[in-house]
Image (cartoon, rainbow, N blue to C red):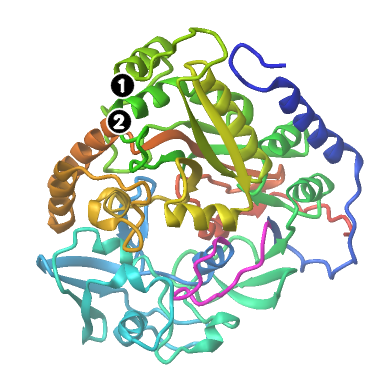
Amino acid sequence: MIARDGVPRIVWHAHALTAGLLLGGLAVPGCAPPPPAAGYLVVGVASSPDNLDPRVGSDAASQQIHQLVFNSLLKLDDRLDVVPDLATRWSTPTDRTYVVEIRRGLTFHDGRPLTAVDVVYTFQSFLDPAFVSPRKGAYRLLASVRALDDHTIEFTLSEPFGSFPINLVMGIVPAGAGAEMARSPVGTGPYLVEEMRPDDRVTLRRFGDYAGQPARNPGLVLKVVPDDTMRGLELRKGTVDLVINDLSPDVVAQLEEDSALRVLRAPGIDYAYVGLNLRDPILADVRVRQALAHAIDREAIVAYLRRGLARPAAGILPPSSWAFDPDGVTFPVDLDRARRLLDDAGYPDRDGDGPSARFRLTLRTSTAEFFRLQAAVIQQDLARVGVDVEIRSTEFATLYADVLRGNFQMYTLQWVGVTDPDMLRRVFHSEQMPPSGFNRGFYRNPDVDVLIDAATRSIDYDERRTLYRRIQSLVAHDVPYISLWYKTNFIVAQRELEGLRVSPYIDFAQLADVSARAPLARVSP
């Protein structure tokens, strides 16, 4: 049964009912791990961290712990702009030089003072050919880093790069730190690592000598619960105090009905899209791409599949970004416009509402249930304008490998945590086609390249914002991506907790502000 808005109702209702039955009728199995210490907050997470060294670990679980254990020279605010963290100020004496001054009186968890030597050591790691890290590419233009005195550091670039300051959002490690940081990190953040049990939990204790406001709770337990529904069950049972983002929309809807829990929301920055292969003879025509964009009903996807935990997207940069173009080109649902564009492109619908299609496209997606349902909605939407879509769902590793090889016509993926407008260069500049960058759809527009190059070189804030807005307008018109939605961030938590805050860029360091109004009622696992 297909509803008027194109959402597969039978599939959707069965999916939501399954979540309701699971959350309402199952008990949480377990092997009775030790209970958390008094006052420690238990945070349910989906996976165990891979590497606790902030210079190396790039998975989500590792980065969450980096935010709790380390400080950076700079950090991001709610507009995704860089602001001081360890730094007191920074300046740009030339377009290739950044000078950063750091606070005095800072200490690592082991009692050692933090000085410019530690900062230099952290960033020189990325210049060391023997140092292996997936993050090294971000520092490709860093020519040198040196200490001017105990609290002043100079960074020199090989060429101008206006987005360089965001690369100073990097946890500072002690000078000489080596492979032991992967499991036993030493930072200056509000928490220190007390215990790490792979695939089970990471326990963090409040750092008493933290230079900032001390944590309002004595510690955190990041409890690994791989299954989405089980995380919801543990919240309902009280063995988990809060979960940040790691729940499906249907599970969140079920938990919202529980009077012992509350749900907090805020606009996020994760971006879902349909990628298009512009080397494909059909998709090479911008009129076809615009027609597809006008045919897809983002509002229905947001309302029914995301349960409102998203908002329709206008481009890769989120509205919370300082560089976002609020007047950019958008593609509201307009089936008549879509049909006219396809006619003009030379693909008439010869039998009107009959069974024959204008042409056929293949949409690649993962086997995850949400993305298969989303692909089905897109398939139905495009069928309304005479485009036949074949869905091919594969495991994520296979899907991703095919995307990197250019083996697709269309695919659905997400960009997670888009925090800097330099992402426009990495995704849409013609020199960033694989293997050099992320221009996987082989988009090419000389005007966009010129504007991106100018924005990349500029260190003037207002000039960069103007250039990035022009870039977004041109890219939106060309439709190398069909924008779908921006994720809505959320926290599901026990009602006794206070100090919770949801931001566009989820920073786990905010957990230091959370406490319980009264002792939490613990239930034995």
Return the mark for residue 224. none
The residue nearer to you, when weighing 427 against 183, is 427
The residue nearer to you, when weighing 147 against 111, is 147
Q: What residue span does the magenta drawing correspond to?
A: 45-60
Image-quadrant location for residue 88: bottom left
Q: Is residue 55 magenta?
A: yes
* Residue at position x 50%, y 19% in the image: 357
In this rendering, the answer to whether 137 lies above or below 110 is: above
Q: Is residue 187 magenta?
A: no
Return the mark for residue 285. 2
Residue of label 1: 345
From where the camera sits, is residue 121 visible?
yes
> Label 1 neighbourhood size at 10 Å, few (<14), some (14-19), many (20+)?
some
Amino acid type, mark 2: Asp
> Label 2 neighbourhood size at 10 Å, few (<14), some (14-19), many (20+)?
some
In this rendering, the answer to whether 315 lies above or below 407 is: above
Amino acid type, mark 1: Ala
* Residue at position x 44%, y 10% in the image: 350
From where the camera sits, is residue 306 visible?
no
Residue 378, x across and y down, in percent: 54, 28
Q: Is residue 375 left or right of residue 313?
A: right
Outermost residue on the left side: it is: 94
* Residue at position x 52%, y 65% in the image: 63
The residue nearer to you, when weighing 426 against 31, is 426
Q: Is residue 516 left or right of residue 315?
A: right
Question: Marks 2 and 1: in contact by CB < 8 Å?
Answer: yes
